[in-house]
Every structure is written in structure tokens, then in C-alpha cells.
Image: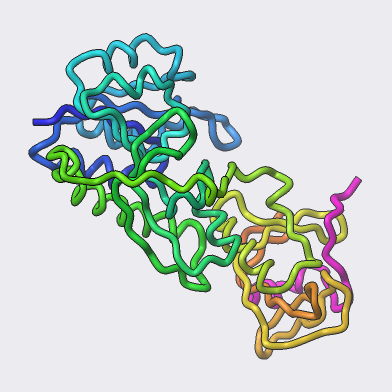
Amino acid sequence: MKKIVFMGTPDFAVPILEALINQEDYQIVGVVTQPDRPVGRKRRLKPTPVKEVALAHDLPVYQPEVIGKDKEVADLLAEDIDLIITAAYGQFLPERLLQLPTYGAINVHASLLPKYRGGAPVHYALWNGDQKTGVTIMRMVKEMDAGDIIAVREFPISTEAIVEELFADLSQLGRDLLIDTLPKFFAGTIEEIPQDHHLAIVSPNITREQEQIDWTQSATQIHNHIRAMNSWPVAHTFMNGDRWKLWRSQVMDATTDKAPGTVITIQKKPAQFQVACGEGTVLALTELQPAGKKAMDVASFINGGSGGVHVGDQFSNQAAK
């Protein structure tokens, strides 16, 4: 039975950990995840999804603030460990830790490497309008997501997919790929393929500034931006200085000569709320969240009085001073 230390944090890693737990050939001897963080208005500490699964199966959990400085984790890996498996863990592992297990360390990464190395590969695949993505299992090295490719599996992206849905799909794909790959990996029958570093594209974590809509872009670009931020961190814009969150949209087969960001249609039958975008294109907002309100579909928005917004009003990138 191979002894494995699993490292992961968000929902993406949960099906992968659960699949490993259910395999008779592997023993999870420790689970490493990020520390509990305060959430909500009351700032209550919330365990990570991976921690919740680990505790439900009575697995030892380690939550170092900085894994490279944690003696407990170093001692765990210095034991007779066969392999580290990571999936969206969220911290860099020092090279000295990667070399401790017999078979080293591998990572389940949600992109087709070398494209989209880094912390937000699914967001960028949607934002860039890619037609496919996938999961890569790679050997972990000192440089971020730069190790040799052990296995890869592609996945098509629909034009309406949002990041939350795509994460869930890729999590299942990564689970299946890992379980299929591990027997061949331990048997030494896989020929690992070096990445072409010249083709590497980095996908760093999304910043607050990147959440904001640029209405001078085309409707298709803005549509991709909105779905790439749904359900986190959520794209936003400003109307009369108030922040609005945008959840879903639809590219319209129409043109306009109005300035980008201008509201050009608000009507009940059919329910439509259309906005002018760059290059004369038009975007319909189908689910939105005005400041101080809950997220709602466009019909509810219009029936509720349209939040004081009228045709000719304009979205901007300026918050109220």
C-alpha cells in the first residue's frame, strides 16, 4: 500500500481526495491544507473544504501558515512516504520537501500546460474565450507549474460556461485522470514529457482591478469576462457611482452607435436590458445585482422598477466619491 500525503484546499480538490481515500491501494497518512480563515460579517473561522473531508474520515490534518517553515509537515514527509499529491493547495513547496517522498511530488492542475500556469487557470481560459481546457498531472519542481507532464486530458468549453461550473467539471476530470494514472506512474511505465517553456502562459490570481468591466471592449469580450468571474470574484461596474455586480450576460446579434456603457434598451416584453459595448456591439445583461440588492434576473430587475436606471444612462469605471 502506497503512503500518500495529500495537499489541497478548495472544492476543486475534494473529489480528488475522496477518490484517493476510497482506493484500497493507497493510504492517506496526512492532509495538508490552508489555515481556517474568517468569513462573513461575523468573521467566523471557516475550515477549508478539504479539511472538512479529512476530518470526516479521521485523517490527520496539518494547516501551516507557511509550509516551508513548518516542522510538523517536514517531519511527516521525512517518514516513509511514497508520494505527495497536490491539487489547488495554494502555497509553494520548497524543493527540499518535494524530494523527500520516494516518488517525489505530483500536482493535478486545471489547465493544458504549459498554458495557464499559476493560481487562476480556469478563470483565464474563460476570460480569453478558449474553446477547450483540461487537466494536467505534472511532476512538481521548484518553478511554478513547470514540471514534466505525466498525463493530460482535454475538456471542451461551452460558450455559456461559468467558472464555478467549469471548476466542478475539471475537478471530476482530474479525479478520474489521477486514479487512471497512478498505477502506471508507480509501475514506472509512463514517459514523462518536458514542457515547452517558450509556450508558457501565466495565470496569476485575479486582482480587484481585474474584476472591473471595460465597456470599450466588444460584447463577446465582456461576456467572457463576466462568466470568467462567476461565481467568484464576480465582475463589477458602476452606475451613478454605485457598484453593480454582473453575473450573466448574452451577446446580441445587433449593432449600435451609442457610446460604450450606454443603456440602450430596458423593456418588459420581451424582458431586455441591453448595453452598448465597444466596436458597436451590444450585450444583454441577463442576471445582475444592483448596489444594495440581491442578484436577480433581468425580468425581476425590470419588474422592480429597474433600480432608477433609464435608457441613455451610462455605466462607468468610477465609484462614488
Q: In the figure, is residue 89 to the left or right of 320? A: left
Q: Position of residue 301 (x, y in %)?
A: 68, 72
Residue shown at the point (66%, 56%) measured from the top left: 235
Is residue 318 part of the magenta span, yes or no? Answer: yes
Pick the quarter of the image with the N terminus. top left
Which contiguous range is marked in magenta? 298-321
Depth check, front residue: 89 or 141:
141
Residue shown at the point (63%, 72%) measured from the top left: 249
Q: Is residue 58 visible?
A: no
Single out the residue that lies furthest toward the right.
321
Q: Position of residue 255 (x, y in %)?
A: 77, 86
Q: In the figure, is residue 117 to the left or right of 49? A: right
Q: How many marks?
A: 0
Q: Is residue 306 above or below residue 23?
A: below
Q: Is residue 119 above or below residue 263?
A: above
User: Residue 208's quadrant in the figure?
Assistant: top right
Residue shown at the point (49%, 35%) measured from the top left: 144
User: Residue 49's quadrant in the figure?
Assistant: top left
Residue shown at the point (82%, 61%) measured from the top left: 239
Q: Is residue 97 above or below residue 14?
A: above
Q: Position of residue 156 (x, y in %)?
A: 41, 68
Q: Position of residue 142 (x, y in %)?
A: 45, 28
Depth check, front residue: 165 or 306:
165
